Image: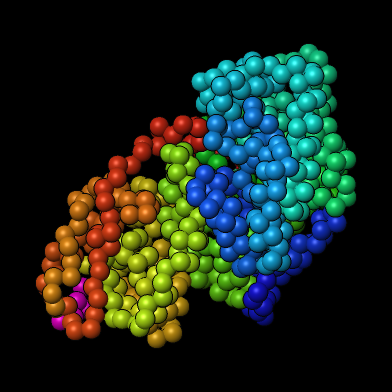
Amino acid sequence: MSTELSAAGQALYPTLLSPLQAGTHRLRNRVIMGSMHTRLELLDRAIERQAAFYAERAKAGVALIVTGGYAPNAEGRIDEDAPVLDSAEHAHTLRPIPQAVHAHGGKILLQVLHAGRYAKVPQPVGASEIPSRINPRAPRRLSEAEIGATIEDIARCSALALEAGFDGVEIMGSEGYLLNQFAVTRTNDRDDAWGGSVENRQRLAVETVRRVRQRLGPEGLIMYRLSAIDLVEGGAPPDEIVQLARAIEAAGADIINTGIGWHEARIPTIAYVVPRAAFRFAAARVQRAVQIPVVASNRINTPELAEAIVGSGDAAMVSMARPFLADPEFVRKAAEGRADQINTCIACNQACLDYIFSDRATSCLVNPKAGRELDFQEMPRPASARTVAVVGAGAAGMACAIAAAERGHRVTLFEAGRRHRRPAQLGPRGAGQGRVPRADALVPPPARGAGRDGEAVHPARRGAAAGLRARGGGHRRAPARAGDSGHRSRQGHQLPGAAVGSAQRWVRRWPSSAPAGSATTSPSTCCTRAPRRPSSSRPNGVSTRPTSRPAG
Ligand SMILES: Cc1cc2nc3c(=O)[nH]c(=O)nc-3n(C[C@H](O)[C@H](O)[C@H](O)COP(=O)(O)O)c2cc1C
Ligand code: SF4
Protein backbone atom coordinates (compact mmCIF):
# COMPACT_ATOMS: atom_id res chain seq x y z
CA MET A 1 0.00 0.00 0.00
CA SER A 2 1.32 3.41 -0.83
CA THR A 3 0.15 4.78 2.54
CA GLU A 4 1.46 3.68 5.90
CA LEU A 5 -0.58 1.83 8.45
CA SER A 6 -1.07 4.43 11.20
CA ALA A 7 -1.04 3.64 14.88
CA ALA A 8 -4.77 4.39 14.91
CA GLY A 9 -5.42 2.02 12.04
CA GLN A 10 -3.31 -0.68 13.66
CA ALA A 11 -5.12 -0.30 16.97
CA LEU A 12 -8.59 -0.26 15.45
CA TYR A 13 -8.24 -3.06 12.90
CA PRO A 14 -5.38 -5.28 14.07
CA THR A 15 -6.64 -8.46 12.41
CA LEU A 16 -8.21 -6.95 9.31
CA LEU A 17 -5.02 -5.19 8.34
CA SER A 18 -2.69 -8.06 9.17
CA PRO A 19 -1.22 -10.22 6.40
CA LEU A 20 -2.40 -13.71 5.59
CA GLN A 21 -0.81 -16.67 3.83
CA ALA A 22 -3.05 -18.39 1.28
CA GLY A 23 -1.43 -21.25 -0.60
CA THR A 24 1.85 -19.93 -1.93
CA HIS A 25 0.64 -16.32 -1.83
CA ARG A 26 1.06 -13.79 0.95
CA LEU A 27 -1.82 -11.33 1.06
CA ARG A 28 -1.06 -7.96 2.62
CA ASN A 29 -4.32 -7.82 4.58
CA ARG A 30 -7.67 -9.60 4.91
CA VAL A 31 -9.67 -7.44 2.50
CA ILE A 32 -10.97 -8.79 -0.81
CA MET A 33 -12.70 -6.70 -3.43
CA GLY A 34 -15.48 -9.08 -4.47
CA SER A 35 -16.32 -10.03 -8.01
CA MET A 36 -18.44 -7.60 -10.01
CA HIS A 37 -19.33 -7.85 -13.65
CA THR A 38 -18.89 -4.20 -14.64
CA ARG A 39 -19.54 -4.28 -18.40
CA LEU A 40 -16.47 -2.04 -18.74
CA GLU A 41 -15.22 -4.59 -21.24
CA LEU A 42 -17.90 -3.38 -23.66
CA LEU A 43 -16.77 0.26 -23.66
CA ASP A 44 -14.09 1.92 -25.75
CA ARG A 45 -10.52 1.55 -24.35
CA ALA A 46 -11.92 -1.41 -22.45
CA ILE A 47 -8.68 -2.89 -21.16
CA GLU A 48 -7.31 0.50 -20.17
CA ARG A 49 -10.55 1.27 -18.31
CA GLN A 50 -10.50 -2.01 -16.41
CA ALA A 51 -6.83 -1.61 -15.56
CA ALA A 52 -7.47 1.89 -14.21
CA PHE A 53 -10.54 0.75 -12.28
CA TYR A 54 -8.74 -2.09 -10.50
CA ALA A 55 -5.45 -0.20 -10.11
CA GLU A 56 -7.17 2.57 -8.17
CA ARG A 57 -8.45 0.02 -5.64
CA ALA A 58 -5.13 -1.82 -5.44
CA LYS A 59 -3.26 1.45 -4.98
CA ALA A 60 -5.36 2.17 -1.92
CA GLY A 61 -4.55 -1.13 -0.28
CA VAL A 62 -7.00 -3.92 -1.21
CA ALA A 63 -5.14 -7.21 -0.83
CA LEU A 64 -6.99 -9.32 -3.39
CA ILE A 65 -9.28 -8.31 -6.24
CA VAL A 66 -11.61 -10.65 -8.13
CA THR A 67 -12.71 -9.74 -11.65
CA GLY A 68 -16.26 -10.14 -12.85
CA GLY A 69 -17.11 -13.56 -14.21
CA TYR A 70 -15.56 -14.87 -17.44
CA ALA A 71 -17.28 -17.83 -19.06
CA PRO A 72 -15.08 -20.81 -19.91
CA ASN A 73 -17.09 -21.46 -23.08
CA ALA A 74 -19.82 -19.84 -25.15
CA GLU A 75 -22.73 -21.74 -23.65
CA GLY A 76 -21.67 -20.73 -20.13
CA ARG A 77 -22.02 -16.98 -20.74
CA ILE A 78 -24.44 -15.12 -18.50
CA ASP A 79 -25.71 -13.37 -21.61
CA GLU A 80 -24.55 -12.95 -25.15
CA ASP A 81 -22.47 -9.86 -24.26
CA ALA A 82 -20.64 -11.55 -21.40
CA PRO A 83 -16.89 -12.18 -21.74
CA VAL A 84 -15.54 -15.64 -22.56
CA LEU A 85 -11.90 -16.57 -22.00
CA ASP A 86 -11.07 -19.47 -24.28
CA SER A 87 -8.08 -18.44 -26.35
CA ALA A 88 -4.45 -17.43 -25.87
CA GLU A 89 -5.06 -14.35 -28.04
CA HIS A 90 -7.74 -13.09 -25.70
CA ALA A 91 -5.62 -13.92 -22.65
CA HIS A 92 -2.82 -11.85 -24.11
CA THR A 93 -5.04 -8.77 -24.42
CA LEU A 94 -5.90 -8.97 -20.71
CA ARG A 95 -2.31 -8.64 -19.55
CA PRO A 96 -2.42 -4.91 -18.66
CA ILE A 97 -5.10 -5.60 -16.03
CA PRO A 98 -3.05 -7.77 -13.65
CA GLN A 99 0.03 -5.70 -14.43
CA ALA A 100 -1.75 -2.56 -13.21
CA VAL A 101 -2.79 -4.27 -9.98
CA HIS A 102 0.65 -5.79 -9.35
CA ALA A 103 2.25 -2.38 -9.82
CA HIS A 104 0.51 -1.36 -6.60
CA GLY A 105 1.28 -4.49 -4.61
CA GLY A 106 -2.15 -6.07 -5.01
CA LYS A 107 -3.16 -9.50 -6.27
CA ILE A 108 -5.94 -10.30 -8.67
CA LEU A 109 -7.94 -13.40 -9.59
CA LEU A 110 -9.97 -13.91 -12.71
CA GLN A 111 -13.39 -15.33 -11.93
CA VAL A 112 -14.44 -18.33 -14.00
CA LEU A 113 -18.22 -18.45 -14.13
CA HIS A 114 -20.33 -20.98 -16.01
CA ALA A 115 -23.90 -19.69 -15.77
CA GLY A 116 -25.55 -23.06 -16.47
CA ARG A 117 -29.33 -22.76 -16.73
CA TYR A 118 -29.18 -19.03 -15.85
CA ALA A 119 -27.36 -18.32 -19.14
CA LYS A 120 -29.36 -16.01 -21.39
CA VAL A 121 -27.93 -17.60 -24.52
CA PRO A 122 -29.78 -19.41 -27.31
CA GLN A 123 -29.44 -22.82 -25.63
CA PRO A 124 -28.48 -22.86 -21.96
CA VAL A 125 -27.27 -26.13 -20.46
CA GLY A 126 -27.59 -27.58 -17.00
CA ALA A 127 -27.59 -30.61 -14.75
CA SER A 128 -31.16 -31.33 -15.85
CA GLU A 129 -33.98 -29.91 -17.92
CA ILE A 130 -35.58 -28.33 -14.87
CA PRO A 131 -36.15 -24.69 -15.85
CA SER A 132 -35.42 -21.63 -13.80
CA ARG A 133 -38.09 -19.07 -13.06
CA ILE A 134 -35.70 -16.27 -14.00
CA ASN A 135 -34.75 -17.55 -17.45
CA PRO A 136 -37.46 -18.17 -20.04
CA ARG A 137 -35.12 -20.52 -21.95
CA ALA A 138 -35.22 -24.10 -20.67
CA PRO A 139 -31.84 -25.78 -20.19
CA ARG A 140 -30.58 -28.79 -22.11
CA ARG A 141 -29.28 -31.62 -19.90
CA LEU A 142 -25.51 -32.06 -20.25
CA SER A 143 -24.35 -35.55 -21.24
CA GLU A 144 -21.54 -37.19 -19.25
CA ALA A 145 -19.12 -36.49 -22.09
CA GLU A 146 -20.17 -32.84 -22.10
CA ILE A 147 -19.64 -32.62 -18.33
CA GLY A 148 -16.07 -33.82 -18.86
CA ALA A 149 -15.59 -31.25 -21.61
CA THR A 150 -16.96 -28.50 -19.35
CA ILE A 151 -14.45 -29.34 -16.63
CA GLU A 152 -11.73 -29.19 -19.26
CA ASP A 153 -12.99 -25.80 -20.46
CA ILE A 154 -12.87 -24.43 -16.91
CA ALA A 155 -9.34 -25.77 -16.45
CA ARG A 156 -8.22 -24.28 -19.77
CA CYS A 157 -9.79 -20.93 -18.90
CA SER A 158 -7.95 -20.99 -15.55
CA ALA A 159 -4.64 -21.76 -17.23
CA LEU A 160 -5.22 -18.91 -19.67
CA ALA A 161 -5.83 -16.58 -16.73
CA LEU A 162 -2.45 -17.52 -15.32
CA GLU A 163 -0.87 -16.97 -18.74
CA ALA A 164 -2.42 -13.50 -18.79
CA GLY A 165 -0.65 -12.71 -15.52
CA PHE A 166 -3.48 -13.16 -13.03
CA ASP A 167 -2.45 -14.67 -9.69
CA GLY A 168 -5.06 -17.37 -10.08
CA VAL A 169 -8.79 -17.86 -10.37
CA GLU A 170 -11.99 -17.78 -8.42
CA ILE A 171 -14.17 -20.70 -9.46
CA MET A 172 -17.78 -19.59 -9.22
CA GLY A 173 -19.75 -22.28 -7.41
CA SER A 174 -22.56 -20.28 -5.81
CA GLU A 175 -25.60 -18.11 -6.58
CA GLY A 176 -27.28 -20.97 -8.46
CA TYR A 177 -24.81 -21.16 -11.35
CA LEU A 178 -23.77 -24.44 -12.99
CA LEU A 179 -21.64 -25.98 -10.23
CA ASN A 180 -24.23 -25.00 -7.64
CA GLN A 181 -27.03 -26.47 -9.78
CA PHE A 182 -25.32 -29.84 -9.88
CA ALA A 183 -24.88 -29.89 -6.11
CA VAL A 184 -28.55 -29.83 -5.09
CA THR A 185 -31.67 -31.90 -5.61
CA ARG A 186 -33.64 -28.80 -6.62
CA THR A 187 -31.99 -28.83 -10.03
CA ASN A 188 -30.21 -32.17 -10.25
CA ASP A 189 -32.45 -35.18 -10.95
CA ARG A 190 -29.74 -37.27 -12.61
CA ASP A 191 -29.21 -40.96 -11.89
CA ASP A 192 -25.68 -41.27 -13.28
CA ALA A 193 -22.30 -40.58 -11.63
CA TRP A 194 -23.19 -36.86 -11.45
CA GLY A 195 -26.48 -37.11 -9.56
CA GLY A 196 -28.28 -38.98 -6.82
CA SER A 197 -26.03 -39.28 -3.77
CA VAL A 198 -24.53 -36.14 -2.25
CA GLU A 199 -21.05 -37.24 -3.37
CA ASN A 200 -22.30 -37.62 -6.94
CA ARG A 201 -24.04 -34.24 -6.91
CA GLN A 202 -20.92 -32.57 -5.56
CA ARG A 203 -18.64 -34.38 -7.98
CA LEU A 204 -18.63 -31.65 -10.62
CA ALA A 205 -17.47 -28.99 -8.13
CA VAL A 206 -14.81 -31.23 -6.62
CA GLU A 207 -13.50 -32.58 -9.95
CA THR A 208 -13.34 -29.05 -11.31
CA VAL A 209 -11.18 -27.83 -8.43
CA ARG A 210 -8.96 -30.91 -8.70
CA ARG A 211 -8.45 -30.42 -12.43
CA VAL A 212 -7.77 -26.70 -12.08
CA ARG A 213 -5.17 -27.41 -9.37
CA GLN A 214 -3.48 -29.97 -11.63
CA ARG A 215 -3.37 -27.43 -14.44
CA LEU A 216 -2.18 -24.44 -12.39
CA GLY A 217 0.31 -26.17 -10.13
CA PRO A 218 1.06 -24.81 -6.66
CA GLU A 219 1.68 -21.23 -7.87
CA GLY A 220 -1.85 -20.53 -9.02
CA LEU A 221 -4.09 -19.20 -6.25
CA ILE A 222 -7.46 -20.98 -6.29
CA MET A 223 -10.44 -19.51 -4.50
CA TYR A 224 -13.72 -21.39 -4.68
CA ARG A 225 -16.96 -19.45 -4.24
CA LEU A 226 -19.14 -21.82 -2.26
CA SER A 227 -22.84 -21.28 -1.70
CA ALA A 228 -22.83 -20.93 2.09
CA ILE A 229 -26.62 -20.81 2.11
CA ASP A 230 -28.83 -21.38 -0.95
CA LEU A 231 -32.04 -19.77 0.36
CA VAL A 232 -34.19 -21.84 -2.02
CA GLU A 233 -36.32 -24.92 -1.46
CA GLY A 234 -34.39 -28.03 -2.41
CA GLY A 235 -31.10 -26.24 -1.73
CA ALA A 236 -28.27 -27.82 0.23
CA PRO A 237 -28.77 -28.39 3.96
CA PRO A 238 -25.96 -27.16 6.25
CA ASP A 239 -24.32 -30.59 6.59
CA GLU A 240 -23.99 -30.91 2.79
CA ILE A 241 -22.51 -27.42 2.57
CA VAL A 242 -19.90 -28.31 5.19
CA GLN A 243 -19.19 -31.60 3.41
CA LEU A 244 -18.63 -29.79 0.13
CA ALA A 245 -16.35 -27.25 1.79
CA ARG A 246 -14.15 -30.05 3.13
CA ALA A 247 -14.08 -31.77 -0.26
CA ILE A 248 -13.14 -28.52 -2.00
CA GLU A 249 -10.30 -28.00 0.48
CA ALA A 250 -9.06 -31.54 -0.10
CA ALA A 251 -9.24 -31.03 -3.87
CA GLY A 252 -6.74 -28.19 -3.67
CA ALA A 253 -8.49 -24.85 -3.11
CA ASP A 254 -6.48 -22.24 -1.20
CA ILE A 255 -9.40 -20.08 -0.06
CA ILE A 256 -13.15 -20.60 0.17
CA ASN A 257 -15.19 -17.51 -0.56
CA THR A 258 -18.87 -17.58 0.30
CA GLY A 259 -21.84 -16.75 -1.90
CA ILE A 260 -25.23 -16.08 -0.40
CA GLY A 261 -28.51 -17.19 -1.95
CA TRP A 262 -29.42 -18.17 -5.48
CA HIS A 263 -30.42 -15.48 -7.92
CA GLU A 264 -33.91 -16.94 -7.96
CA ALA A 265 -34.19 -16.81 -4.14
CA ARG A 266 -37.06 -14.69 -2.91
CA ILE A 267 -35.15 -13.64 0.17
CA PRO A 268 -33.13 -10.45 -0.32
CA THR A 269 -29.41 -10.98 0.00
CA ILE A 270 -27.84 -7.64 -0.84
CA ALA A 271 -30.61 -5.03 -0.72
CA TYR A 272 -30.67 -2.29 1.89
CA VAL A 273 -33.25 -4.22 3.90
CA VAL A 274 -30.66 -6.89 4.61
CA PRO A 275 -29.03 -6.17 7.97
CA ARG A 276 -25.32 -5.60 7.66
CA ALA A 277 -23.26 -8.79 7.89
CA ALA A 278 -26.52 -10.74 8.16
CA PHE A 279 -24.91 -13.85 6.67
CA ARG A 280 -21.79 -13.89 8.77
CA PHE A 281 -23.10 -17.01 10.52
CA ALA A 282 -23.06 -18.95 7.24
CA ALA A 283 -19.39 -18.15 6.63
CA ALA A 284 -18.57 -19.00 10.25
CA ARG A 285 -20.13 -22.45 9.84
CA VAL A 286 -17.84 -23.13 6.89
CA GLN A 287 -14.77 -21.63 8.58
CA ARG A 288 -15.23 -23.97 11.54
CA ALA A 289 -15.18 -26.96 9.18
CA VAL A 290 -11.97 -26.28 7.24
CA GLN A 291 -8.37 -25.21 7.80
CA ILE A 292 -8.01 -22.88 4.80
CA PRO A 293 -9.17 -19.24 4.98
CA VAL A 294 -12.90 -18.65 4.50
CA VAL A 295 -14.27 -15.33 3.32
CA ALA A 296 -17.42 -13.66 4.66
CA SER A 297 -19.49 -11.70 2.14
CA ASN A 298 -22.58 -9.55 1.60
CA ARG A 299 -23.54 -6.28 3.25
CA ILE A 300 -20.25 -5.74 5.04
CA ASN A 301 -19.55 -2.06 4.53
CA THR A 302 -17.47 -0.67 7.39
CA PRO A 303 -13.99 -1.56 8.63
CA GLU A 304 -15.38 -1.92 12.16
CA LEU A 305 -17.72 -4.67 11.05
CA ALA A 306 -15.02 -6.31 8.93
CA GLU A 307 -12.64 -6.30 11.91
CA ALA A 308 -15.33 -7.78 14.15
CA ILE A 309 -15.77 -10.67 11.73
CA VAL A 310 -12.12 -11.53 11.21
CA GLY A 311 -11.18 -10.66 14.78
CA SER A 312 -13.75 -13.11 16.13
CA GLY A 313 -12.54 -15.85 13.83
CA ASP A 314 -15.91 -16.19 12.09
CA ALA A 315 -13.97 -15.82 8.85
CA ALA A 316 -10.33 -15.25 7.96
CA MET A 317 -11.13 -12.62 5.34
CA VAL A 318 -13.94 -10.34 4.24
CA SER A 319 -15.14 -9.65 0.74
CA MET A 320 -16.65 -6.29 -0.09
CA ALA A 321 -17.84 -5.67 -3.61
CA ARG A 322 -20.07 -2.58 -3.80
CA PRO A 323 -18.20 -0.78 -0.99
CA PHE A 324 -15.28 -0.55 -3.42
CA LEU A 325 -17.47 1.17 -5.96
CA ALA A 326 -18.55 3.66 -3.33
CA ASP A 327 -15.01 4.30 -2.15
CA PRO A 328 -11.85 2.92 -3.78
CA GLU A 329 -9.87 4.22 -0.78
CA PHE A 330 -11.76 2.18 1.80
CA VAL A 331 -8.67 0.29 3.01
CA ARG A 332 -6.33 3.26 2.97
CA LYS A 333 -8.73 5.40 5.00
CA ALA A 334 -9.16 2.63 7.56
CA ALA A 335 -5.42 2.08 7.76
CA GLU A 336 -4.84 5.78 8.32
CA GLY A 337 -7.47 5.98 11.05
CA ARG A 338 -9.83 7.93 8.79
CA ALA A 339 -12.73 5.51 8.66
CA ASP A 340 -15.13 8.40 9.26
CA GLN A 341 -14.17 9.61 5.81
CA ILE A 342 -15.16 6.42 4.02
CA ASN A 343 -17.89 6.99 1.47
CA THR A 344 -20.32 4.27 2.52
CA CYS A 345 -22.20 2.01 0.11
CA ILE A 346 -25.88 2.43 0.99
CA ALA A 347 -26.99 -0.78 -0.77
CA CYS A 348 -29.38 1.10 -3.04
CA ASN A 349 -28.24 -0.85 -6.14
CA GLN A 350 -29.28 2.07 -8.29
CA ALA A 351 -26.07 2.65 -10.23
CA CYS A 352 -24.36 -0.72 -9.92
CA LEU A 353 -26.80 -3.58 -10.41
CA ASP A 354 -29.55 -1.48 -12.00
CA TYR A 355 -27.08 -0.22 -14.59
CA ILE A 356 -25.89 -3.73 -15.38
CA PHE A 357 -29.47 -4.91 -15.79
CA SER A 358 -30.20 -2.09 -18.19
CA ASP A 359 -27.13 -2.85 -20.30
CA ARG A 360 -24.96 0.01 -19.04
CA ALA A 361 -21.53 -0.08 -17.45
CA THR A 362 -21.66 -0.09 -13.69
CA SER A 363 -21.07 2.96 -11.53
CA CYS A 364 -22.17 4.13 -8.10
CA LEU A 365 -24.83 6.50 -6.82
CA VAL A 366 -22.53 7.92 -4.17
CA ASN A 367 -19.38 7.84 -6.31
CA PRO A 368 -20.07 8.61 -9.96
CA LYS A 369 -16.34 8.29 -10.70
CA ALA A 370 -16.56 4.52 -10.21
CA GLY A 371 -15.90 2.82 -13.54
CA ARG A 372 -15.06 6.16 -15.14
CA GLU A 373 -11.55 6.55 -13.77
CA LEU A 374 -10.07 7.45 -17.14
CA ASP A 375 -12.65 10.10 -17.89
CA PHE A 376 -12.18 11.88 -14.60
CA GLN A 377 -8.41 11.66 -14.74
CA GLU A 378 -8.49 13.50 -17.99
CA MET A 379 -10.31 16.56 -16.61
CA PRO A 380 -7.99 19.55 -17.01
CA ARG A 381 -6.93 21.20 -13.78
CA PRO A 382 -8.24 24.73 -13.33
CA ALA A 383 -5.68 27.49 -13.88
CA SER A 384 -6.64 29.19 -10.62
CA ALA A 385 -8.92 28.54 -7.67
CA ARG A 386 -12.33 30.16 -7.84
CA THR A 387 -15.04 30.86 -5.32
CA VAL A 388 -17.93 28.52 -6.05
CA ALA A 389 -21.41 28.50 -4.56
CA VAL A 390 -23.25 25.22 -5.02
CA VAL A 391 -26.96 25.46 -4.45
CA GLY A 392 -28.77 22.42 -3.14
CA ALA A 393 -27.23 19.87 -0.82
CA GLY A 394 -28.82 16.85 -2.44
CA ALA A 395 -26.79 14.02 -3.93
CA ALA A 396 -25.82 16.03 -7.02
CA GLY A 397 -25.05 19.18 -5.06
CA MET A 398 -22.88 17.36 -2.58
CA ALA A 399 -21.02 15.51 -5.30
CA CYS A 400 -20.54 18.76 -7.18
CA ALA A 401 -19.25 20.54 -4.05
CA ILE A 402 -16.82 17.75 -3.29
CA ALA A 403 -15.50 17.60 -6.84
CA ALA A 404 -14.99 21.36 -6.93
CA ALA A 405 -13.25 21.38 -3.54
CA GLU A 406 -11.00 18.49 -4.56
CA ARG A 407 -9.98 20.51 -7.57
CA GLY A 408 -8.89 23.35 -5.36
CA HIS A 409 -11.83 25.74 -5.52
CA ARG A 410 -13.31 27.56 -2.53
CA VAL A 411 -16.76 26.10 -2.21
CA THR A 412 -19.83 27.05 -0.26
CA LEU A 413 -22.74 24.61 -0.36
CA PHE A 414 -26.19 26.05 0.27
CA GLU A 415 -29.32 24.12 1.14
CA ALA A 416 -32.82 25.45 1.71
CA GLY A 417 -33.55 22.85 4.33
CA ARG A 418 -32.15 22.89 7.79
CA ARG A 419 -29.38 20.48 6.82
CA HIS A 420 -27.96 18.42 3.97
CA ARG A 421 -30.11 15.56 2.82
CA ARG A 422 -29.84 12.23 4.53
CA PRO A 423 -29.35 8.82 2.99
CA ALA A 424 -32.89 7.92 3.95
CA GLN A 425 -34.09 10.74 1.74
CA LEU A 426 -31.77 9.96 -1.11
CA GLY A 427 -32.03 6.24 -1.60
CA PRO A 428 -35.08 4.22 -2.50
CA ARG A 429 -38.00 4.69 -0.13
CA GLY A 430 -36.85 3.67 3.31
CA ALA A 431 -33.29 2.92 2.27
CA GLY A 432 -30.84 3.36 5.03
CA GLN A 433 -33.32 4.06 7.76
CA GLY A 434 -31.65 2.80 10.86
CA ARG A 435 -29.26 0.73 8.81
CA VAL A 436 -26.73 3.07 7.29
CA PRO A 437 -23.94 3.26 9.81
CA ARG A 438 -23.29 6.93 9.34
CA ALA A 439 -26.11 9.27 8.61
CA ASP A 440 -23.49 11.44 6.96
CA ALA A 441 -22.68 8.85 4.34
CA LEU A 442 -23.75 11.16 1.59
CA VAL A 443 -21.88 14.20 2.78
CA PRO A 444 -18.77 12.40 2.11
CA PRO A 445 -15.54 12.96 3.78
CA PRO A 446 -13.66 14.79 1.06
CA ALA A 447 -15.92 17.75 1.74
CA ARG A 448 -15.24 17.58 5.44
CA GLY A 449 -11.55 17.05 4.80
CA ALA A 450 -11.51 19.97 2.44
CA GLY A 451 -13.18 22.06 5.12
CA ARG A 452 -10.44 21.24 7.55
CA ASP A 453 -7.92 22.33 4.97
CA GLY A 454 -9.45 25.75 4.91
CA GLU A 455 -12.14 25.29 2.28
CA ALA A 456 -15.62 26.53 3.03
CA VAL A 457 -17.56 23.38 2.23
CA HIS A 458 -20.46 22.96 4.56
CA PRO A 459 -24.18 22.50 4.60
CA ALA A 460 -25.39 26.03 5.10
CA ARG A 461 -28.58 27.32 6.61
CA ARG A 462 -30.95 29.27 4.44
CA GLY A 463 -29.97 32.46 6.22
CA ALA A 464 -26.42 32.15 4.94
CA ALA A 465 -27.68 32.91 1.48
CA ALA A 466 -28.27 36.47 2.53
CA GLY A 467 -24.51 36.82 2.79
CA LEU A 468 -24.07 36.33 -0.92
CA ARG A 469 -24.34 39.30 -3.23
CA ALA A 470 -25.97 38.51 -6.51
CA ARG A 471 -24.60 38.99 -9.98
CA GLY A 472 -25.76 37.97 -13.43
CA GLY A 473 -28.44 35.14 -13.48
CA GLY A 474 -26.09 32.27 -12.69
CA HIS A 475 -28.95 29.80 -12.37
CA ARG A 476 -31.07 28.10 -14.84
CA ARG A 477 -34.39 26.70 -13.82
CA ALA A 478 -34.20 23.01 -13.06
CA PRO A 479 -35.42 20.99 -16.02
CA ALA A 480 -37.06 18.49 -13.73
CA ARG A 481 -40.05 18.88 -11.43
CA ALA A 482 -39.89 18.24 -7.73
CA GLY A 483 -41.20 14.78 -7.06
CA ASP A 484 -39.91 13.23 -10.25
CA SER A 485 -38.72 9.78 -9.44
CA GLY A 486 -35.24 10.12 -10.88
CA HIS A 487 -32.88 12.16 -13.02
CA ARG A 488 -29.83 11.41 -15.01
CA SER A 489 -26.80 13.60 -15.36
CA ARG A 490 -25.11 14.05 -18.72
CA GLN A 491 -22.82 11.16 -17.86
CA GLY A 492 -25.87 9.04 -17.21
CA HIS A 493 -25.67 8.85 -13.44
CA GLN A 494 -29.03 8.41 -11.82
CA LEU A 495 -30.01 10.92 -9.17
CA PRO A 496 -33.00 10.84 -6.86
CA GLY A 497 -35.79 13.23 -7.71
CA ALA A 498 -36.18 14.38 -4.13
CA ALA A 499 -32.68 15.83 -4.10
CA VAL A 500 -33.23 17.81 -7.25
CA GLY A 501 -36.61 19.00 -6.03
CA SER A 502 -35.10 20.41 -2.88
CA ALA A 503 -32.45 22.38 -4.72
CA GLN A 504 -35.02 23.69 -7.13
CA ARG A 505 -37.26 25.08 -4.42
CA TRP A 506 -34.31 26.87 -3.02
CA VAL A 507 -33.12 28.20 -6.37
CA ARG A 508 -36.46 29.88 -6.95
CA ARG A 509 -35.86 32.12 -3.97
CA TRP A 510 -32.32 32.93 -5.06
CA PRO A 511 -31.43 36.53 -6.10
CA SER A 512 -30.65 36.82 -9.80
CA SER A 513 -27.01 37.77 -9.37
CA ALA A 514 -23.90 36.60 -7.49
CA PRO A 515 -20.85 38.19 -5.85
CA ALA A 516 -17.88 39.37 -7.86
CA GLY A 517 -15.29 36.67 -8.45
CA SER A 518 -17.66 33.81 -7.80
CA ALA A 519 -19.04 31.08 -9.99
CA THR A 520 -22.43 29.76 -9.09
CA THR A 521 -23.84 26.42 -10.05
CA SER A 522 -26.91 24.42 -9.33
CA PRO A 523 -26.91 20.66 -9.50
CA SER A 524 -30.15 20.88 -11.39
CA THR A 525 -28.42 22.44 -14.36
CA CYS A 526 -26.65 19.18 -15.09
CA CYS A 527 -29.72 16.99 -14.85
CA THR A 528 -32.14 15.72 -17.41
CA ARG A 529 -35.18 13.62 -16.76
CA ALA A 530 -34.88 9.87 -16.92
CA PRO A 531 -37.66 7.55 -15.87
CA ARG A 532 -36.66 5.01 -13.29
CA ARG A 533 -36.96 1.38 -14.14
CA PRO A 534 -39.32 -0.33 -11.70
CA SER A 535 -37.45 -2.89 -9.67
CA SER A 536 -40.03 -5.54 -10.50
CA SER A 537 -38.91 -5.40 -14.13
CA ARG A 538 -35.32 -6.33 -13.43
CA PRO A 539 -34.57 -9.15 -15.79
CA ASN A 540 -32.43 -11.46 -13.77
CA GLY A 541 -34.69 -11.76 -10.80
CA VAL A 542 -32.24 -10.47 -8.21
CA SER A 543 -34.56 -9.29 -5.52
CA THR A 544 -34.03 -5.83 -4.15
CA ARG A 545 -37.49 -5.25 -2.78
CA PRO A 546 -38.12 -5.00 0.92
CA THR A 547 -39.50 -8.15 2.40
CA SER A 548 -39.05 -10.18 5.52
CA ARG A 549 -35.66 -10.49 7.14
CA PRO A 550 -33.42 -13.18 5.75
CA ALA A 551 -33.47 -16.62 7.26
CA GLY A 552 -30.97 -17.22 9.99
C1 LIG B 1 -22.71 -4.83 -10.37
C2 LIG B 1 -22.46 -6.17 -9.71
C3 LIG B 1 -21.99 -7.23 -10.48
C4 LIG B 1 -21.72 -8.47 -9.86
N1 LIG B 1 -21.17 -9.47 -10.62
C5 LIG B 1 -20.76 -10.61 -10.00
C6 LIG B 1 -20.04 -11.62 -10.72
O1 LIG B 1 -19.75 -11.50 -11.91
N2 LIG B 1 -19.67 -12.74 -10.04
C7 LIG B 1 -19.94 -12.91 -8.70
O2 LIG B 1 -19.54 -13.93 -8.12
N3 LIG B 1 -20.61 -11.97 -8.00
C8 LIG B 1 -21.02 -10.83 -8.61
N4 LIG B 1 -21.66 -9.86 -7.88
C9 LIG B 1 -21.98 -10.10 -6.46
C10 LIG B 1 -20.89 -9.56 -5.53
O3 LIG B 1 -19.68 -10.30 -5.67
C11 LIG B 1 -21.32 -9.63 -4.04
O4 LIG B 1 -21.57 -10.97 -3.71
C12 LIG B 1 -22.57 -8.83 -3.74
O5 LIG B 1 -22.50 -7.55 -4.34
C13 LIG B 1 -22.76 -8.66 -2.23
O6 LIG B 1 -21.62 -8.14 -1.63
P1 LIG B 1 -21.48 -6.57 -1.23
O7 LIG B 1 -22.59 -6.27 -0.26
O8 LIG B 1 -20.12 -6.48 -0.61
O9 LIG B 1 -21.63 -5.80 -2.48
C14 LIG B 1 -21.96 -8.64 -8.48
C15 LIG B 1 -22.45 -7.57 -7.73
C16 LIG B 1 -22.70 -6.34 -8.33
C17 LIG B 1 -23.20 -5.20 -7.47
S1 SF4 C 1 -24.93 2.38 -6.37
FE1 SF4 C 1 -25.70 2.16 -4.29
S2 SF4 C 1 -25.51 -0.08 -3.89
FE2 SF4 C 1 -24.30 0.34 -5.71
S3 SF4 C 1 -22.25 0.61 -4.89
FE3 SF4 C 1 -23.16 2.66 -5.02
S4 SF4 C 1 -24.09 3.03 -3.01
FE4 SF4 C 1 -23.62 0.85 -3.16
Q: In the displayed structure, does residue 30 sit left or right of residue 133?
A: right
Residue 226 position, x and y percent, is 71, 40
Residue 528 position, x and y percent, is 26, 51
Look at 84% across and 36% down and name the residue there.
211
Q: Main secondary structure of the magenta part?
A: helix
Q: In the displayed structure, does residue 460 sit left or right of residue 279?
A: left
Provide the residue span drawn in magenta. Answer: 462-469
Please tell me in which quadrant of the rendered image residue 60 appears. Answer: bottom right
The quadrant in which the C terminus is found is: top right
Check the image and tell me how it is coloured.
Answer: rainbow
| Residue found at the very far bottom of the displayed protein | 454
Look at 71% across and 16% down and name the residue there.
189
The quadrant in which the N terminus is found is: bottom right
Looking at the image, can residue 224 be seen? no
Along the line of sight, which residue is nearer the eye, 186 or 330?
330
| Residue found at the very far top of the displayed protein | 191
Instruction: Look at the image and say whether residue 259 sits in the magenta stretch.
Output: no
Please tell me in which quadrant of the rendered image residue 202 appears. Answer: top right
Residue 459 position, x and y percent, is 31, 73
- Residue 116, above or below 383: above
